[in-house]
Each structure stands twice: as C-alpha cells, then as structure tokens.
Image (spheres, helix red, strand yellow):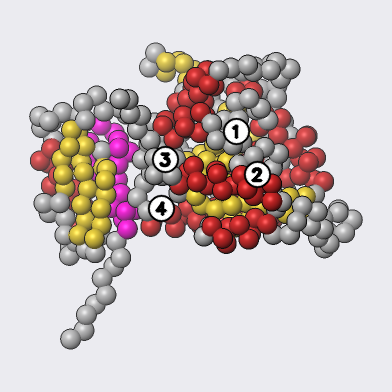
Amino acid sequence: MNDIPRKLIVPKNVTDALSGISYPGSKENIVSLDMVQEIRIAGQKVSFSLVFQKSDDPNIPLLVKTCEEAIQKNIGAEVEIKGNISVKYVHNMERPILPHVKNIIAVASGKGGVGKSTVAVNAAVALAKQGAKVGLIDADIFGPSIPKMFGAEGERPMAERIDNKDMIHPVEKFGVKFLSIGFFVAPENALVWRGPMASNALKQLIVDGLWGELDYLLIDLPPGTSDIHLTLVQTVPVTAAVIVTTPQDVALADVIKAVSMFQSQSIDVPVLGLVENMAWFTPEELPDNKYYIFGKEGGKKLADQMGLKLLGQIPIVQGIREGGDDGTPVASGDDQTGEAFAELAKNISHQLHLRNIRQAPTQKVKITRK
C-alpha cells in the first residue's frame, strides 16, 4: 500500500486561500479586513474564526460556505474544514490599520549608541534596491535622525485632505518612503514631551501616513524599552523584530532585555534575529584587514546562545559615517559595505518568509482595563 505524503499546511496557506474573497459590497478582502482570526492547524484539520460586526449580518452563511470552498480548492480537497469555521461577532470592529502593508518590522536595540538608525536606514535602502516596496518610520521620537541620513532635513511632507481627514504624503528617496517627527519640529529644538504626547506622535505617523502598498514597513524604535514600544504593538500587528547590537559585553547584556520584551507572553512578537553592527574595523586603504576593536563575534555568540539567527555583521568603515552625514546611505552603493547591507536585506527577507509560512500572523496587543 503506497501512502502519498500529505502536504504540510501552514497559516499562510490559509490566508492566501482566503485573500481572494471580498466582503460583499466592499473592495477589500476578508483577510485585509481582519475578519480571519485564530487560525489553528492540526494535520489536515484547519479551523479559524470568521469575525463579523453584527450577529444578524446576512452575509454570514454565504461567506462561511465560500471560505470552505476556497480552502478545499486552493489547499486540497482532503482538508478538513467543514464545520470548523467559528463565527464570532465584534461590535464596532475597527478597520485594520495599514491593510496594504505586508510586513511591519520593528528595528530595536537594548541600548543607545549601537547604530540602530544607521542599520534601519541602510536595510530599508538595500531592500528597496532589491526590488521591494519599502517604508520607514522614525519612531525615535526624542532623537530623530533619519531625515539627516537621507539628506532630507529641509523637506516638509505634503498634506492632503481625504475623507475629511488630513493625511501625510511620506517623503521618498532611494526608493524608500519615510516619515519622521523630525520633519515637524525645528532641528535645534529639544523635544520635551511626556509619554502620551510621544505615543500620539508615533500613532499619527503610522495612521495618517499615505503608505500605499508596501512589502516592508520598518519602524526605527528608540533604544531600550519604553512607552513607544508598547504604543507600536498596541497600534499595529508587528510581524517581527530585528535587534541591533555591537560585539562588546555591555551592549550584549541589554540585548537580552530587548529580546525578552518582544518574546514575552503579553507582546508575543517573533524576533527574526540579531544584527551585529561595528563588528570589526576595516581601514579604507586595507580593505582585507579586520580589527576587532569591540571584541570578536559577540553578537554571533549571543545569537547562538539564544537560538536566534545572526542576520548580518556590519563593519566599521568611514563610508558609513560619511553616508549618514551627507545623506547618501552607503547601501545605495556597490562597495564592500553596501554588499554587507545587501546581505542583511536578503537575510531579513528570507527569515520573514520562513516566519510567515511557519507562524500565524501577529495580533495587536489588546489594552485591558480592570
């Protein structure tokens, strides 16, 4: 008797199968409307919740049947789906934020001074250079540096009135759409804001930006863990986090806190891996030489210890500093350092692909009040 091995089913198979189903009367599909939730897979048995705003929605029977047919057509006739779709109701169900953004990536660090913003900017440019549609939000509210790194300090994003709401057109350079609080305050002015003010500023950059369709939206977070981090995961479902560190022990100790925050049960955002910045020093006149002035492979060793991927090792070279100062990210070029960021972008893209086929979509952190 020859048993034909059955195809492994993952959550992405389910969302892909259902993304062609539009809610009647709407141009958007039921996946982008956040109606498909709580996907569970056990062998060939697939179950999920279909969430409606009203219990008397006349479309319920039709959509349940359409979902069953789409699953069996797109995944396989042998899939056990009939009777496994739970109908739930959420009154005043909010429309999903950023429905046309495929992946939201938090770029974080345990401490300041590790070059997190430099990595975020150059990773975004490298992803765009490889053909992706990329956005970047400068969520480092108290120290916005991204406008300078893109040579866009004098830019002022255009506003447009849409459906009685003022929306913001992101600035675009090197193929990356980006917004920063730095566009809306004078560079010489210090921001003295309480937590709620900073959180509201971040929400505005996310919600009021005209981001359009994006493959990746990178969020450059402040160092450490703060209200800004909580605001982000409460505002949008963050697909994954990337943690930036340097090789020395003092930086590595803080990485553990950052990873623990994202992986905590209450937040539950997958960590794609670590980026070891300033991994070694290479003089321009001696491009083949490596001097490990901050220690050797501390980030690699920590990634191994924590069971995380090392996404990239970025050297210290003069070109990175010059590119950040004159507004030309080094990733836009084809030299050795540009290649390091190109490799980082490929690894981020690959690990995100694996994350999306192996794990269910991230949910926003729910705010509970007692």
Which label's residue is closer to the chain start, 3 or 2? 2
Tell me which amino acid carries mark 4: Asn
Q: Are marks 1 and 2 in contact (CB under 8 Å)?
A: no
Which label's residue is closer to the chain start, 4 or 3? 3
Q: Is residue 208 left or right of residue 298?
A: left
Q: In this view, does 92 lie to the left or right of 294?
A: left
Which stretch appears magenta?
Answer: 10-34
Query: Mark 3 — residue?
Result: 267
Q: Position of residue 111 (x, y in %)?
A: 64, 39
The alpha-carbon separation of the residues under discs 4 and 3 comes to: 17 Å
The answer to whether residue 17 is seen in the rendering is no
Q: Residue at x 37, y 36 (%)?
A: 364
The alpha-carbon separation of the residues under discs 1 and 2 comes to: 13 Å
Tell me which amino acid carries mark 3: Ile
Query: Mark 1 — residue?
Result: 222
* Mark 3 closeness class: few <14, some 14–19, many ≥20 residues within 10 Å: many
Give the quarter of the figure containing the C terminus. Answer: top left
Query: Mark 4 — residue?
Result: 356
Q: Position of residue 165 (x, y in %)?
A: 42, 15
Which label's residue is closer to the chain start, 2 or 4? 2
The alpha-carbon separation of the residues under discs 3 and 2 comes to: 24 Å
